Image (cartoon, rainbow, N blue to C red):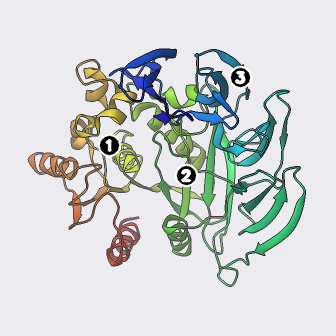
Amino acid sequence: MTWGPREKFIYIAILNRDQNHLRLIKYNSKTGEPVDTLFEETNRKYVHPMHPLTFVPGHPDWFLWRSERDGWDHIYLYNTSGKLIKKLTKGNWVVVDFLSFDASAKNIFFTSTKQSPIERQLYKLNIKSGKMRRLTKGSGVHRIILRKDGKYFADRFTSLTVPGITSIVNSEGEYLLTVHKSENPIKNYNTGKIRIFKIKTENNADLYCRMVTPVNFDSTKKYPVIVYVYGGPGVQLILNAWPVGRYAFWFQKMAEEGFIVFTVDNRGSANRGLAFEQATFRHLGTVEISDQMRGVKYLKSLAYVDTNRLGVFGWSFGGFMATSLMLRTHNTFKVGVAGGAVIDWKYYEVMYTERYMDTPQANPEGYKEANLLNYVKNLKGKLLLVHGTSDVTVVWQHTLMFAKKAADLDVPLDYFPYVGHKHGVVGIDAIHLYNKITNYFLDNL
């Protein structure tokens, strides 16, 4: 929803319940009555508007609209009568963030995956001519703060090998000043080596992978592997960026303990175009498993991987995936840990679930196929479920249903509730959680 610059109108993108038909409607802000439908977008699977209109400064009747109508997230220029003036960006890449205009509103600034899906580069585009140029230097991820007039921006750059360089750059892409250069904060530690690479799906699409090898890695030895997985819509795990945060440091902890940690961004994940994301439509968990098993096939090709000691860990959609991989891959994985896992999509949030699965009434077979309660009997390895008891995102009922089914079938299951925590476990209890996860893999893998 967006206010018009003159405050006479409100512009709202409205979806039908099936989320496959969008109407951009102009409303009278005083009466609330619809004035005009500016345009419509349809898609056989789904349309998901994620960004409001952006009006062009000095042109109150022009606005920018982000759409995936051609299969990629691009920027379109419209007028308030609903006429498409021009498509501003195009190509087999996505706009990640629209930042702003310059002072004259002749140029726009945005970050995109044009250089690579695992990079973020800043671009400047002239609205009239369509001429576009990249302003940032260095292969990796650039996080940008743009000055209001667009003359200068702060560029915070990282990559797998660069902890962080903050620079001041002008709108022509000239680097004027290095504000700060971060030292490697773990340079005095013996850490596992990280590399990013690609494998292929059965239809020759690229899947980006990351591997952290154990400290003091010896290719003549055999190592257990922990597959860390998310795999769901709207998230991309593999980026050419400096690894930080609880997961990055936990990966290093496990590398120190002698594990390989492996991750693949399967089809269904973000920033690879609509076809890549929509490959999982109505069948969450199926194509994703296929792609994760492509990763397993790659692991099994490596002489230093102990294929009898494969583990998997994930949270939220990743918890759904970790549990799925434990139950639906003929015991490929010996040990799994799933946090805040979706077990039955009928009990997950309506807009998200129906976008990717349709309703249970319209897609009963898809819901049945994805319902992990139907596979509890397949569990042969060790599985630990953890869940916050006050989780309002993936409600506690998911894990409780799974635990009840396991008890009914006399299937061994490990479970720990984090009392009072929501979808993530934070504070001092996070230490308890990660000690528990670490020890579970040490004890069983």
Whether the residues at callouts 3 and 2 have beta carbons within 8 Å, the answer is no
Where does the image place residue 434, in percent across and percent down from the top left? 39, 71
- Quadrant of the snapshot with the N terminus: top left
Q: Position of residue 409 (x, y in %)?
A: 12, 45
Provide the secondary structure element on which disc 1 rests: helix
Residue 42 in view, yes or no:
no
Looking at the rendered image, the disc whose residue lies closer to the viewer, 3 or 1, is 3
Q: Which residue is mark 3?
A: 87
State the CA–CA distance, disc 3 to disc 2: 36 Å
> Is residue 302 rendered to the left or right of residue 320?
right
Q: Name the side, left or right, on which 438 lies relative to 116.
A: left
Q: Amino acid at mark 3?
A: Lys
Residue drawn at the location 57% of the way across and 57% of the way down: 305
Q: Amino acid type of disc 1?
A: Leu
Work out whether residue 108 or residue 247 is closer to the camera in this orientation and state it. Answer: 108
Residue 78 vertical placement versus 206 (above, below): above
The label shown at residue 263 is 2
Question: Between tags 3 and 2, which lies in front?
Answer: 3
| Residue where numbered disc 1 is placed | 327
Viewer-side label of 1, 2: 2
Q: Is residue 377 left or right of residue 284?
A: left
The quarter of the picture where residue 212 lies is: bottom right
Q: Nearer the viewer, residue 301 or 259?
A: 259
Q: Looking at the image, is mark 3 or mark 1 earlier in the sequence? A: 3
